[in-house]
Image (cartoon, rainbow, N blue to C red):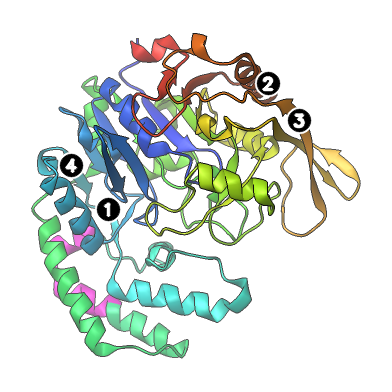
Amino acid sequence: MKNPTKVDVLLGLQWGDEGKGKVVDVLTPRYDIVARFQGGPNAGHTLEFDGKKYVLRSIPSGVFQSGSMNIIGNGVVLDPVLFRQEAEALEASGVDIRKKLHLSKKTHLILPTHRLLDAANEKAKGGAKIGTTGKGIGPTYTDKISRNGFRLGDTLLDLENRYIQARDRHIGMLEALGAEIDRDALAENEKAWFDAVKYLHTYDIVDSEHFINKQLNAGKTVLCEGAQGTMLDIDFGSYPFVTSSNTICAGACTGLGVAPNRIGDVFGIFKAYCTRVGSGPFPTELFDETGKLIRDLGHEYGAVTGRERRCGWIDLVALRYAIMLNGVTKLIMMKSDVLDGFDTIKACVAYEINGEQTRDFPYTIEGDNITPVYKELPGWNCPMTQMRSTEEFPENFKAYIEFLEQELNVPIAIVSIGPDRKQTIVRDTALLK
């Protein structure tokens, strides 16, 4: 029986793209509220059921469950234009989103000039670029931290004057960077932005910290949904090749206004292998045909951008680090079926740095001085996508799960063997109660 005064947190443990959207959708029937606590529209969650595929960027994955309530928290940065497109697409597919979604007044908004700044900043970095999606996420969080942010609640007060002040400041910054500004295109984007803000006003805009705590006090169950992954955390990820927010469990506290003593279970999601998109170090990356095969079998292309993901064997050094930072209580392994046809599976159990082995994640993983230390395990060479119980799993796959649990010291509660809801095997039956 869940403690009704606790929230559970679900987040990614690798470099994002772990399959959080599908798992949230699977778990939401057991929760009254799903709340997104950080990130922006650069994070795409793909869900597949009833023969249809949906990609969510900012909206919590609980919107597909009847009776569920959803919150976009203050830790999120929201693009009004992209939100409107996403919401109207859901409405067209029959989802009554307005009755299910609440928006935090303290959510920061992405302005048209934030996108221009994103592109200009990346261009200025040259070969050291981060590899952002260009959606204005970083500049929006920069404004937030420098106390120049534009929040959703501000649009209810003095929309036009506050917008002009923020825009003109951005234009000055763009001119200082030597960026060319297409004034006609900017004017068109501004019109769409103002129209989209009016659309936002048709939703329930709330003081989300009060709202969520009152719901908890009333005994409602809450699942907090993170975006990206732990190794992209602004503090603990592979800096500077990271996102602009706290993707770890602590981000649920600051991104929703939930106290630390109200955190219950922490569900950590990881793939049976590892991927990364964009720039940045990746110790177990495979540059050979095996890496390409994993990419093709796993359809490893960005849900929002379509960008090709870099692929490699599972990195248990980074995974143990992520489990420690988040206080993970239950693990969820995704895309196990992608490895169905391999004779041998490899797992990185340690790093060799300057001739010495370590199981601890170091200050930096940049450079050529880190060599993954692999353990080889026999593959299962058996298609699992049609299996519906743990009893059907091949023995070598069961051994792989046991090996991971011993290495990570946390139970694997759910195993995913395909993109559909039905291809989700629950090993921890307590999750069904």
The residue tagged 4 is 101
The answer to which image quadrant residue 192 occupies is bottom left
Which region shows up in magenta? 152-166
Q: Main secondary structure of the magenta part?
A: helix
The alpha-carbon separation of the residues under discs 2 and 3 comes to 11 Å
Identify which residue, 299 or 153, lies in the foreground. Answer: 299
Q: Is residue 338 left or right of residue 65?
A: right
The residue tagged 3 is 376
Q: Is residue 263 left or right of residue 209?
A: right
Mark 4 secondary-structure assignment: strand
The alpha-carbon separation of the residues under discs 1 and 4 comes to 15 Å
Q: Is residue 273 left or right of residue 55?
A: right
Which quadrant does the N terminus fall into?
top left
The alpha-carbon separation of the residues under discs 3 and 1 comes to 49 Å
The residue tagged 1 is 106
Q: Is residue 162 magenta?
A: yes
**Circle 3: is it few (<14), some (14-19), or many (20+) Cα within 10 Å?**
few
Looking at the image, tell me whether mark 3 or mark 1 is earlier in sequence order.
Answer: 1
Looking at the image, tell me whether mark 2 or mark 3 is earlier in sequence order.
Answer: 3
Residue at the spot x=42%, y=22% of the render? 386
Query: Label 2 is placed on what type of residue?
Result: Phe
